[in-house]
Every structure is written in structure tokens, then in C-alpha cells.
Amino acid sequence: MSAAGAMHESLAAATGEQPAARATLAAALAAGPSHAYALIGPAGSGKRAVARAFAAELLASGARDPEEARRRALAVPSPHPDLTWVQPPGNQHLIDEIRGRVIGAISYRPFEGEHSVYVIEAADAMAEESQNALLKTLEEPPPYAHLLLISSEPEALLETVRSRCQTVRFAGLRHELVEERLVAEFDLPPATATALAALADGDLDRARFLASDPGTGLRQLCERCCRAVRAGQLDERPWTALLEQAAEIGERRGHEVEDAASARAEEIGKGRDADRIRREGAEAAKRADRRERTEAIDAALSLCAAWFADLVAYAEGAGELARNADRATELEADSSGIDPLAARQAAELAMETRRRLTVNVNEELALDALFQRIASTLGQS
């Protein structure tokens, strides 16, 4: 196992902005890893990348070819047979998947090397039934198996689950750091980078999405919806275009996941392993499609809430507090004559709908109801 002072560059890079997590995992690699870890911290703070890099170190240990094992573990999606990565297909994990891919599979010895790793992303999206089913596995896992639970909302995890995991804590990224990354990666104007970092609230993953072409398009559609509602122009239901954009984002991501799996299967050629990778790639593509679509709608509702909150700031003469710092002209025009209390209520309605969608409410009906209610609140029904 790697010594604390000789952490592999992939894990060192992943934990670069998280010194507390880096110290915890370095100590684990030096002394011998625990059976279960809970990676806890705000969304976009790098937990997923650290989990993948840590899993790669565990799988490289004792492998016949450590560098090759590490390379496959770091790939997305990973073709390593001893790395199981479980993501919720939508807003919630399926108990059958937790039972089948983790609880039922963990008793099988590793195909390669000395370790197997099971990562449950968005572990807080497990229903109580799934968490209770996982308890015995967390209590008495085989000595070769390690579980990594990733959570942005640890309060949604049962205390009995949290207490059986060693906690690895992550801090939220500074907005300034997110701005620097956006400028470097997307060559954005500083004002736009500042706005996106604020809108993402330090979530680097979301900020990167908002800076991408699909994210830029989604943001423009959100502003169109908000301004249409502000003007009482509801007949065209502009939020249907928003849902279509979210569906396209999901479909595009699904194709990327399936194409990556197909490419890896082509490298292997024919045989059982290639067939397994193709099959699992198709299943992962469906999950990725649904997950990306859900996250795009969540981002859209967050953007709508921020727009109405910014109208409050401008209406009350505090435009410098607005998160959409690169939309000053539009916000100033839209805030003219608006009731700050009504705009604040509109922002709260958007956030309420955002919370409701986590329990699989029909998205189209939810957005219909949301924008009708906002129009009524603003006196534009």
C-alpha cells in the first residue's frame, strides 16, 4: 500500500484543494484502509474524483500490474472488474440495484489483485429501506472489500449507516477558485466567470456545466421563462423548451457513456469480458441519461430562483448582491415596478418545486404549476 509520503499523483491531484481529505486518505493508505468510508461535503467539492482516485489506489495494491490496474480504475466508465460504481438512475437509488450490485456481489472474491471496491454515489439518495438493507454489509464486509459512500446531504443518511463508516470531510470550494478554473478552462470573460461561480454556489461541476454550450443554452431558456412570466406571456409555455433541452442533455450524456463502453469493448475484441462491458455500458447509458436530465432540470430551477432573487436585490437598490452579475441591464429593466415581496415569493416557489422533484413528481406538470403560480404571485395571471 502507498506510504503517506508517496501518494500517487492521481490521488494527490484529486485531493489538491481538500487538505483534510488528503490527510485522512494518506493515513489510511499508510496504515491500511478501513472497510467503509463516507465522503461527505458540498456538491462539486471533488468527492467523486477523490473516490475514483482512492479506489484506483486500493485496486492497484497487490495487482499484478499496478499501473494498468490504476489506469482502468480511473477510466470513466471504468472497465476494471473489481470496481463497482453505483449511481441513482434518477432521483433515488433502486433497492434491487443496491441488493444486486453491492450486497449480493460483495461476497465474490476479486477477479484481480487483492481488493474490490464498491462506490455508492449520492448515497443520501438511498431510501431508508435500501440503507437498512446495507447495514449488515457495512458491519461485516469481507476483508478484501471496501465501500465508499459519497454524500452531499449526510443528514439524509441513517446514523447507523454513518457510524459504520470512517468520515472523509470535504469543504466547499472558494468562489474565487471556481472563477479561476472557469476562466482557464473555458476562456470566459471575468464577469461571466464570477456570475457562474455564484450561481453554482462553489459547485465546480455545476459551474463547468453552466459554462458549457448546453449549460449556456439552458441558462438562456431559464431567463426567457422568467422574463415571459414577468411580462405575463404564458401562452407559449416557454418552459416546454426548457424540458426539451434537459432531455437533449440527458440523451447526449447517455450516448457518451455507451460510446465509451463500446470503444473499450472494441479494444478487448470478442469474448465474455467484451460482452459484459457492452451490456453494462448500455445499462449505464440509460442511468446517465436519466441522471443528467434530472440534474439539468434541477439546475434550471435553481437558475430561475436566482433570477427572481436578483430582481429583489435590484428592486431594493442592492444590485451589487445579484448573482447574475453579467445580466445587470436585463435585471434592472425587469425589476422596474416589481413588488420585492412577490419576487421573493417567486424565488421560494422555484426552490419548493426543486425540492418536490426529488420525489419523482411529474416534471412537466410541476413546471406548468410553478410558472402559473409565479405569474399569479407577480400579478400577471
Image (cartoon, helix red, strand yellow):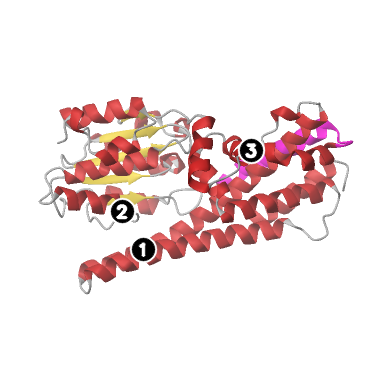
- Contact between marks 3 and 2 (CB within 8 A): the answer is no
Decide whether residue 222 is among the magenta residues. Answer: no
| Element class at badge 1 | helix
Q: Is residue 27 left or right of residue 218?
A: left
Depth check, front residue: 324 or 155: 324
Decide whether residue 342 is among the magenta residues. Answer: yes
Q: Which residues are magenta?
A: 336-358
Residue at x 22%, y 32% (from the top left corner): 34
Pair 3/2: label in front: 3
Closer to the chain start, of discs 3 and 2, is: 2
Q: Which residue is mark 3?
A: 191
Question: Quadrant location of residue 27?
Answer: top left
- Contact between marks 3 and 1 (CB within 8 A): the answer is no
Residue at x 21%, y 70% (from the top left corner): 272
Q: In the rendered image of this protein, does residue 248 appear above or below residue 31?
A: below
**Which amino acid, by three-letter code, is at mark 3?**
Ala
Q: Which residue is mark 1?
A: 260
Badge 3 density bin: few <14, some 14–19, many ≥20, Cα 10 Å:
few
**Which amino acid, by three-letter code, is at mark 1?**
Ala
| Element class at badge 2 | loop
Residue 174 placement (x, y as % from top left): 50, 29
Give the dominant element type of the magenta stretch: helix, strand or loop. helix
Alpha carbon of mark 3 to alpha carbon of mark 2: how far? 34 Å
- Contact between marks 2 and 1 (CB within 8 A): the answer is yes
Closer to the chain start, of discs 3 and 1, is: 3
- Disc ID at residue 59: none
Q: Which residue is mark 2?
A: 75
